[in-house]
Image (cartoon, rainbow, N blue to C red):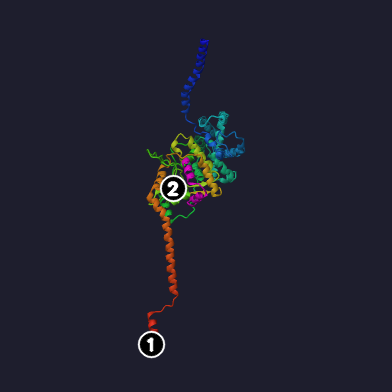
Amino acid sequence: MEGEKLEIVVSSSTYHSQPDDEWLMSMTSKGRKNQQKPPLIPKVPSKFRKVIQSRDCYDPSVVSIGPYHHWNEGLKDMGGLKFDLACQFVKDSGGKPEEMYQKVKQEAKDARKCYMEDEATKKFDEEQFSKMMFIDGCFILQFIYYFLHKPENLMMSNHEASLVTRDLFLLENQLPFVVLESLWSFRAGESKLDILLRNFCKHVRAKPALGRRKSFRQMILKLYGKLPKALTGNVSKGLDEQTQPTHLLEFFHAQYVHSGVSDDHPSGKKTPSYWHYPAKEFRNVGISLMPSKTSRFSDVRFEPTLLGGTLYIPQLIIGDCTKPLLLNLVAYESCSSVKSNDWVTSYVCSLGSLIDSAEDVKELRSRGLLLSTLGSDQQVADHINEMAKHVVLKPCAFTGVKKAIESHHRNIFKRWILHYKNPVSAATVKYSFLYGFIITAITTFRSKEPSFSHAQICGQGKSTFHQ
């Protein structure tokens, strides 16, 4: 019995040892898999889709681009118009359809590697995938060209055109940039592709008007600022134009994140994760809010003054397409291999820190920082807070700005001056007003009294003496 019992224990131990060895060996193979580069056009991470309020921001509403949403039955209605615009692009190009298609087909094999392998992409054979790349690419280019130059030829309402524009900047609705370049090369006599796309991006990232008239000094400075560029023929360029973007969303991101911006890595000192004041409170601590000079999301800076300072924030138009655009840029940054690129994420967090209520939105509107087409200020506040709620400001973003604001707040002398500045100013105005009122009353009273000259008085006395 003892021998039999021992045999059972040994055999049991032998049975379990093999899976343990496989588990240990699998750690090495799994590590190799994790080192593989993610697809250049990834899908939106599941953590973003779990947010119910933002779930609709990642799926196309009217038109599918690329393989991920190609089989969506709800988007088939745009198929006919998409094909018509693609045909018009071929016609306007003047090239032979066979040559244009063959050029795209040569790029299709590498283009397929840009996407994640899933059920949607596996449904395409080589010919189907090439055909999709060709039609979608022609449609994108013709839509953008008509949108900018001949909107009457789009054969769709303004609302539909707005929805198509929204869909073109979704992370899962992208086409490899090489396909667009291959097709645009047939448009002889047209401007370069990057100029066309840059103008399209400018429309999407339109800056709101300041809402107040510029001073003569500001207009002169603006004129002198443009003069050197006009004389030299220089045109402002986006981020790393020597590096070809992967897709349209990445091109947009490159235009509005400054190439010179970098992370600040504080050594040993704790850096505040955000500024502690909503917009309506900044005035109380001596800090003014002003729009940045550029539209770049990374252009957040703080300029100190004698007792306060000015916080510069990029302007933003809040509309139906703003939330999908910003959240897809955030999703793109989270999937990017360059982790220093997440400046849009940081901008969204910073904007959320500025807004607690409708009063903060009103303050930002009055400073020319926000322009809304959504409705009430409370709706705008809810809209922005929903975006900022589930994203995190990276610790090294805008470090200099956060430290400057924190340092200003901790300055006891400045706080003392600012604390008594308003009461003293109010008292000065109050007592100046009383003083002015009293002086005015005395002057008025004296003006109503009969006035006699010294000669008249002497004359009257003299006349009485003679009588």
Residue 22 spot, x, y in % from top left: 49, 20
Judge by depth and name the residue closer to the eye, 51 or 250: 51
Q: Specify the farthest residue to the front.
A: 1
Pointer 1 local density, CA inside 10 Å: few below 14, some 14–19, many at least 20: few
Residue 230 spot, x, y in % from top left: 42, 48
Q: Secondary structure at mark 1?
A: helix
Pointer 2 local density, CA inside 10 Å: few below 14, some 14–19, many at least 20: some
Instruction: Report which residue position mark 2 lands on.
Output: 312
Residue 404 figure quarter: top left
Give the residue drawn at x 50%, y 16%.
Answer: 13
Instruction: Report which residue position mark 1 lands on.
Output: 465
What segment carries the magenta color? 344-368
Vertical relation: 284 (above or below) 333: below
Residue 134 spot, x, y in % from top left: 55, 34
417 sits to left or right of 373: left
Indicate which disc, 1 or 2, sits on the residue closer to the N terminus: 2
Q: What main secondary structure does the magenta stretch of the protein show?
A: helix
59 sits to left or right of 448: right
Residue 257 figure quarter: top left
Give the residue drawn at x 39%, y 51%.
Answer: 414
Q: Secondary structure at mark 2?
A: strand
**Any part of residue 174 in sight:** no
